[in-house]
Image (tube, rainbow, N blue to C red):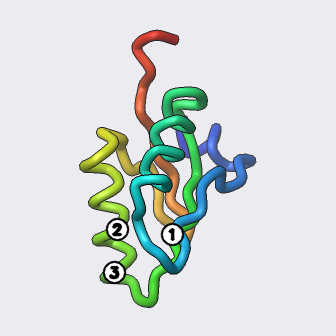
Amino acid sequence: MLRARAHALRPVVIVGQAGITPGVMNEINVALDYHELIKVRVNAADREQRREMVSRICGDTGAELIQSMGHIVTLFRENPDA
């Protein structure tokens, strides 16, 4: 169900060469609060580094990894206030 909803979405946050900065984490949290279901583009040198970054994002934000395809990950975090 969530994968189907996410199909038409475009990445709202891009993790660049600087990696996971406090500003990037803030943007991810804001996007999750507003949209609940988002896509994030994680630009990392290799798969292992990308996995570590995604794991850190999920751990720090409390988001659930829905799907990972290449550099694009789909995350979900329910907003209890919505």
* Residue type highlighted by circle 3: Gln
Q: Provide residue 60's location: percent of width, then percent of height.
A: 28, 47
Drawn side of residue 34 relative to residue 56, left or right: right
Helix or strand or loop: what does disc 1 sit on?
Answer: strand
Q: Using the rendered image of the protein, determine whether residue 76 is visible from the camera's viewpoint.
A: yes
Spot occupied by residue 73 in the image (x, y as percentages of width and height): 50, 59
Q: Residues within 10 Å of mark 1 (few under 14, many from 20)?
A: many
Which mark identifies residue 49? Answer: 3
**Tag 1 residue:** 42
Q: Position of residue 55 (x, y in %)?
A: 28, 60
- Numbered mark located on residue 32 in the image: none
Which three-letter amino acid code belongs to the residue tagged 2?
Answer: Met
Residue 70 seen from this side: no
Contact between marks 1 and 3 (CB within 8 A): the answer is: no
Q: Is residue 71 above or below residue 76?
A: below
Q: Is residue 39 left or right of residue 61?
A: right
* Disc 2 to disc 3: CB gap under 8 Å: yes
**Residue drawn at 45 percent across, 39 percent down:** 29
User: Tag 1 or tag 2, which sits nearer the N-term?
Assistant: 1
Q: Amino acid at mark 1?
A: Val
Nearest the viewer among 77 and 67 is 77
Q: Earlier in the sequence, mark 1 or mark 3?
A: 1
Q: Residue furthest bottom?
A: 45
The residue at 58%/52% (across/down) is: 39
Using the numbered discs, state the Cα–Cα distance from disc 2 to disc 3 in whole angstroms.
6 Å
Circle 2 is placed at which residue position? Answer: 53
Local secondary structure at mark 3: helix
Q: How far apart are labels 1 and 3 at the CA level?
A: 10 Å
Q: Quadrant of residue 72?
A: bottom right
* Circle 2: element type: helix
**In percent of the image, x 42 and y 25: which residue is there?**
78
